Amino acid sequence: MPANNLRQADVPASAEVLGNPDGSAPAFALRIDRCEFFFLPGVPREYHRIVEEVVLPRLVAATGNAVLRSRILHCYGVTESKLDELVSAIREAHPEVRFGFRTKFPENHLSLSALASSAAIAEANLSRVERKCRDALGPFVYGADGVTFAQALGEELARRGETICCAESCTGGLLTQLLTEVGGSSRWTAGAFVTYSNDLKQAALGVPRELLQQHGAVSEPVVRAMAEGARQRSGASWSAAITGIAGPDGGTPDKPVGTVWLALSGPRGTTARLAKYRGDRGQVRLQAAYGALQLLREALGPARVP
């Protein structure tokens, strides 16, 4: 045995050794005043087994065999402070459910946790408060419990038998990455064009040279032509296009860093929108990708998105 493995046998004198059936890293519990701490190995396979077989049963017993039910509502288009304000009255009226807030830029999430003496009571409390929160938040909620914004929209496209193709400039394929990062995304993603240069915008998407010369790449006429060219060439039901200035350089007084044009071409024509984003390059690119998804969401109708 290597000598450095000996340190894995060292635990505090007052600790309770929990054992580790799948490895040699120590796992132990230690009580400090009123709190019990669990120290576990970091290897996922070892950690999860000890949590499932040792830690969780102890936590359940410590709460009097109470049952916990939780839900995370994913929101986009609302700040954390506004989210808190919209549900504050519900939180005050329902102390049986615990509220929590988390920012996952550019989203904000609301977590609801119901602890009760039985599964039926916990689920009833959670369902009742969740319905109230969804009513209060309206279209800001796009999904729950791990579903991504792009996935929620993709699943709706698949349900309708429709597809989307992306035409991206400043985002460099980020929108397409968001649409394809979950399994089964081939059901809604037809493909993408990443056209960073003006020459490629012309060659791949058919953007007229005169539009680029007259208006510049970051303009409404160009982003509309990008979206329409991508839809025509791909045969997709929808096409989202993005062109902008992500920074940190390249901005002008008329078009500062963060200026982004978005467009969506679909069965009912083409819609374009000008956005002015703040933040570093990564934040501008991510917000632009979300902005394009929001155009799609509005076109599909928020009530149809899970």
Image: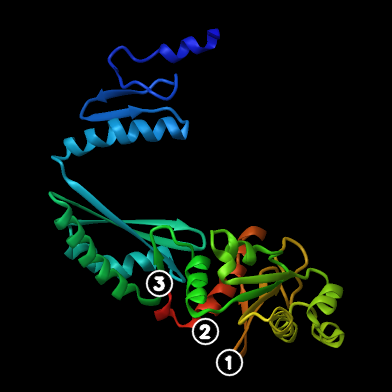
Q: Residue at 36% x, 57% y: name it.
A: 101
Q: Are marks 1 and 3 in contact (CB under 8 Å)?
A: no
Q: Is residue 38 visible?
A: yes
Q: Where is 73 relative to 261, above or below?
A: above
- Amino acid type for the residue under numbered disc 3: Pro
Q: Are marks 1 and 2 in contact (CB under 8 Å)?
A: yes
Of the 4 image quadrants, the one containing the C terminus is bottom left
Disc 1 to disc 2, C-alpha distance:
9 Å
Left or right: residue 105 versus residue 216 is: left
Marks 2, 3: nearer the viewer: 3
Q: On screen, 143 above or below 227?
A: above
Tell me, yes or no, if residue 277 can be seen here: no
- Given the image, on which type of amino acid does mark 1 rest? Arg
- Neighbourhood count class around disc 3 (C-alpha, 10 Å): few under 14, some 14–19, many 20 upward: some
Q: Secondary structure at mark 2?
A: helix
Lower position in the chain sequence, tag 1 or tag 2: 1
Residue at 31% x, 12% y is 13
Q: Which mark is residue 279?
A: none
Q: Which mark is residue 268?
A: 1
Query: Which residue is identified by label 2?
Result: 299
Query: Few, some or many C-alpha atoms within 10 Å of disc 1 (few <14, some 14-19, many ≥20)?
Result: few
Q: Earlier in the sequence, mark 2 or mark 3?
A: 2
The image quarter in which residue 205 lies: bottom right
Q: Quadrant of residue 41?
A: top left
Mark 1 / mark 3, whichever is N-terminal: 1
> Residues under labels 2 and 3: Cα distance?
15 Å
Circle 3 residue? 306
Q: Position of residue 239 (x, y in %)?
A: 64, 79
Q: Quadrant of residue 251?
A: bottom right
Residue 30 located left or right of residue 218? left
